[in-house]
Image: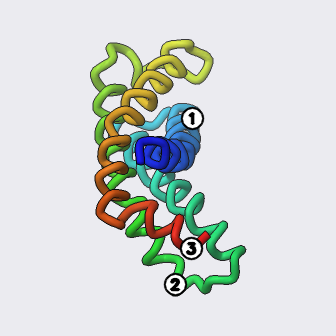
Amino acid sequence: MNRLAASATTHCLTGCAIGEVLGLAIATALDWGNFASIVLAIGLAFFFGYAFTAVPLLHSGLTLAVVVPIALAADTVSIIVMEIVDNAIVLLIPGAMEAGLADPLFWGSLAVALAIAWVAAVPVNRRLIARGRGHAIVHGLH
């Protein structure tokens, strides 16, 4: 159960991390403010998080109408937990939101925040899987 929860969390974190990095990089390059940066990063984190679940299911032959509710059920709670923790930590690290793309503080704070978000989401995913929810639904389709 712990291994499955860790795997599910890593899967979810991968999509979230891609969205976070891309969103914050775009917003930083465009010199957007903190609020717009966070909104874009969260939006892309959800997009990529759901996509990492949806695409393999679509490739297995399931229709989009079947896949969308599965992806939403499998990933929403985990992504919410990760995004709350990740963004709170980045906001708490002095200078992290103002750091540019070439600044090690930008990448270091993001890496620390994502690592802590993973730790926070593992027990959430474990509980969901134990109850037959979350990634347990997806694993049942593979």
**Label 3 to label 1: alpha-carbon separation:** 35 Å
Q: Which residue lies under the disc numbered 1?
A: 25
- For the residue marked with disc 1, what is the amino acid? Ala
From the image, state whether disc 3 or disc 1 is nearer to you.
3
Q: Is residue 132 above or below residue 85?
A: below
* In this rendering, the label closer to the viewer, 2 or 3: 3
Picture quarter containing residue 30? top right
Q: Amino acid at mark 3?
A: Leu
Q: Are marks 2 and 1 in contact (CB under 8 Å)?
A: no
- Label 3, secondary structure: give it: helix
Residue 138 falls left or right of residue 88: right
Secondary structure under the numbered disc 1 in the rendered image: helix
Q: Which mark is residue 66?
A: 2
Report, in whole angstroms, how far the alpha carbon at label 2 lies from the one at label 3.
11 Å
Name the colour scheme: rainbow
Amino acid of disc 2:
Val
Left or right relative to 127: residue 105: right
Q: Earlier in the sequence, mark 2 or mark 3?
A: 2
Q: Which badge, 2 or 1, is on the more N-terminal residue?
A: 1
Q: Which label was assigned to residue 141?
A: 3
Q: Position of residue 79 (x, y in %)?
A: 39, 51
Q: Position of residue 7 (x, y in %)?
A: 52, 45
| Residue occupying image coordinates x 48% and y 42% | 3
On-image quarter of the C terminus: bottom right
User: Above or below — where is 69 with respect to 112?
Assistant: below
